[in-house]
Image (cartoon, helix red, strand yellow):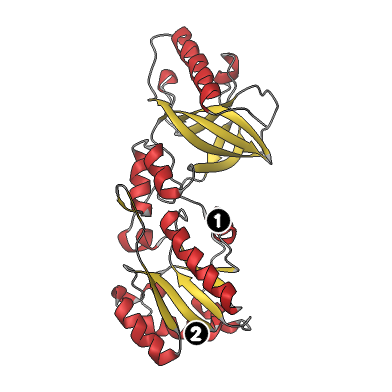
Amino acid sequence: MSGATSLADLTSRPSRGPSLVTIGVFDGVHLGHQRLLEGLVRRARQNGLRAVVVTFYPHPDLVLQGLHGRYYLTCPGAKETLLREQGIDEVYTLAFDDALRRISAETFCRKLRQGLDMRELSVGQDFALGHRREGNVSRLRELGRQRGFDVQVNDLVRDGEGVISSTAIRKALEAGDLTGARRGLGRSHAVAGEVVRGAGRGRQMGFPTANIAVWERQVIPANGVYASQVWLGEKRFRAATNVGRRPHFDGEALTVEPHILDFDSDIYGQWLRVSFEVRLRDERKFNSLDALVTQIAADAEATRKLTGKQD
């Protein structure tokens, strides 16, 4: 999943020429990240240099704080795609492990200067690098003077609720607040995965669903039903997507199951992407199967009205 490399690998590769570099996790590639990347890419283009991102996997929070469960806004592959869509030329994912977290800021910058011919390091105001975060902005500027690179410090980006951050977006999604998440991401939150076989109850009720094997470490919205858009390859459809444990059937496993409107093809084994647009309701247990069927029909109709026409 990660495709991560080591810091030593950077220094062993032939240089592709001078670069402007930014370092960070960039989970979600949210609007704050995008503002920093926009400036980096613009300066790189103006000066005929490469725009390079150095990022990490696993997330440092998971290593340093021992966190588990769903934490990532984007899987590594999707993150790299988003970074390249911002105009980044090269993305290097470093394996964040016990050895890397103990490297000093001086060693880290020296290796980046050597391996990437780094001419500028672009960071946010709150950035810190190296063991025990000793490489704050002041220290990085000192290292830049010593090693021959500039340090560009970027203001934190705010919305109406405060500083845009991956943490705030995670909290919004965990509360089912799609508006808050979209305000930070600049787009709707999406997950993707292979369509796998489920119990087949949806088809028996007349509302077949695609059971998606979402990466077990990615954040999904709070349990409930969502008006969504789904992509099967380049084709877009509307879907009423249930996130949860199917309490009416005493389910235990957490599932993401879109009912794709006006669609009845066998797509088992195919890759499906789901974009969550509007939260329709909480997930709940119904008094009867008929009541559940009636509600699903209402969810489908609400989705039809809220998500526009299909491709």
Judge whether 188 appears above or below 106 on screen. above
Can you give x and y, in whole percent of width and height, for residue 138 in the image? 30, 80
Q: Residue at x 33, y 72 (%)?
A: 128
Quarter of the image that includes the C terminus: top right
Image coords of residue 164 (percent x, y): 35, 54
Q: CA distance from mark 2 to mark 1?
A: 25 Å
Asked whether 223 or 152 is in front, the reply is: 152
Element type where label 2 sits in the image = helix
Q: Residue at x 59, y 61 (%)?
A: 84
> Is 45 placed left or right of 137 in the picture?
right
Q: Amino acid at mark 1?
A: Leu
Please determine whether, in this image, residue 64 is positioned above or below residue 13.
Answer: above
Question: Percent from the top left, x then y, of residue 136?
Answer: 31, 76
Nearest the eye: 55 or 276: 276
Determine if residue 104 is in view.
no
Mark number, residue 188: none
Q: Quadrant of residue 152?
A: bottom left
- The structure residue drawn at horizontal position 40% and vertical position 45%, both measured from the top left corner, is 183
Task: Return the residue at label 1.
Answer: 82
Q: Are marks 2 and 1 in contact (CB under 8 Å)?
A: no
178 left or right of 306 in image: left
Which residue is identified by label 2? 113
Residue 18 in the figure: left or right of residue 290: right
155 vs 212: above or below: below
Name the image quarter holding residue 211.
top right
Q: Is residue 22 visible?
A: yes
User: Pointer 1: residues within 10 angstroms few (<14), some, or many (20+)?
Assistant: some
Mark positioned earlier in the residue sequence (2 or 1): 1
Q: Secondary structure at mark 1?
A: helix
